[in-house]
Image (cartoon, rainbow, N blue to C red):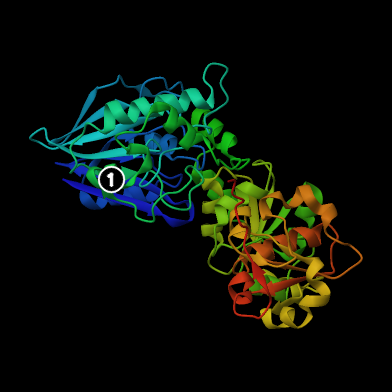
Amino acid sequence: MRIEQIYTGCLAQGAYYIFSKGEAAIIDPLREVGPYLKRAQKDGVQIKYIFETHFHADFVSGHLSLAEKTGAPIIYGPEANPSFDAYIAKDGEEFTLGELTIRVLHTPGHTIESSTYLLLDKFGKEKAIFTGDTLFLGDVGRPDLAQKSDVLSVEALAALAFESLRNKIMPLPDDVIVYPAHGAGSACGKNMMKETVDNLGNQKQMNYALRADMTKEEFIQEVTSGLLPPPAYFPLNVKLNKEGYEHFDKVLAKGLKALSPEDFENFVNQKNALMLDVRSPEAYAQSHIPNSIFIGLDGNFAPWVGELIVDINQAILLIAPEGREEEAVTRLSRVGFDQTFGYLKGGIKKWISAGKQTEEVNSVPASDLEKVYEINKNNIFDVRRKNEYLSEHLESVQNIPLSNLNDHLKQFPKDQTFFLHCAGGYRSMIASSILKSRGYHNLIDVRGGFNALSLTKIPKTAYVCPTTL
């Protein structure tokens, strides 16, 4: 028997590969299924089952492609209603995998169809649970991400989650290993641990949602309070996972077309394509194509794409580091952005040699801002998330989180110089690219962000929660 967690850091997502006696199962596969097929071939095993814990919102699963290439059935728990052929298991139903048994535990709450898969060894002992978004390490799945329903409210789903945890998961032995679908950094929960594997006994001690003396009312209050709005692409990904999508091989072939500067420019003009620059913040600042948007690969690339590009059907052309074009197309497809139509062959150097126009971003070190802080403090914008800003920020600066940037464009002065910073420089460069594409050219990016500003003498403050006597 072998269990392997295949963890994808940029999505904070865990897929699982299990095999025993020549048979394998994949749980919650990613969009690109080649690695699973190669692994099964290397191990000399047949992929027998594809298990889905629920209809995912934060990424497009590879279930359809994997089923087509292997003939393995796609299995969901009760209440799932996909538009494609799938096996809808009953609560408690068991599947044999070599010497192992996988039992379906219907655990609604995060979504109505959410299910946990309990792994039993050849002696019938409970060994592990694959919890999807029902149970994370240190947290539970949000009850507000399911497709809108006229039947169940967020509070009703939270109540179901309470019952699922108490009746299906907490009675299991403490030594059962918990394998969740996500870790810290995912928007599917609020406060997950950085670890990606734990035992259930430890979670019963550490996870607030598994507190033995917690009432249902307390649980509902805990899991429904402080929820940030989910990224705009989440319901679109649910729709793709539920109804189907174009196979990844076709998406990749379409996206890996190398375009000359002339063809690149013509396509942008004819198709109103978004020019997405996925290089480093430093490279983008030094030289970029006018009106291109920066979202770098070496950051939370896919989540920010989903957060900021409203339409998953938007035509996209890439400006990528040489050799990373396939990575960019792949990571876009993981969150449902399948309309990539090629990349700039030879990159920005080829664009410049063809005599095409470029622009730059004025990016300065934190020490430069320190020198002019007093006379510019009302024109400094912090684009970190609200909770980061409240934790500590520069005195007098305004907070406009990157995710809300387009809703607050009027707050940026068009006739005055202003400064942008985030935590380390990644998000502020994204903000700079968006603002420049909207006609704001008098901006200055603070290189190194708040991490660098913390070393300066610029006064800082933190939000103090008011108290009542």
Q: How many marks?
A: 1
Q: Residue at x 35, y 25 (%)?
A: 163
Residue sitting farthest toward the top: 151
The quadrant in which residue 237 appears is top right
Question: In front: 468, or 426?
Answer: 468
Q: Classify mark 1: helix, strand or loop.
A: helix
Question: Is residue 272 in view?
Answer: no
Position above or below: 290 against 349: above
Percent position of residue 406, x then y? 76, 50
Q: Is residue 109 left or right of residue 395?
A: left
Q: Residue 303 in the image: x percent, y percent?
A: 56, 50
Drawn side of residue 431 relative to residue 61, left or right = right
Q: Residue furthest left?
A: 123
Relative image position of residue 453 (x, y in whole percent)? 64, 75
Q: Is residue 216 left or right of residue 415?
A: left
Residue at 10% x, 36% y: name it: 122
Question: According to the image, label 1 marks what residue?
Answer: 205
- The residue sitting at 50% across, 28% down in the picture is 242
Where's residue 337, x and y in %? 60, 45
> Which of 173/105 is in front?
173
The one nearer the camera, 19 or 467, is: 467
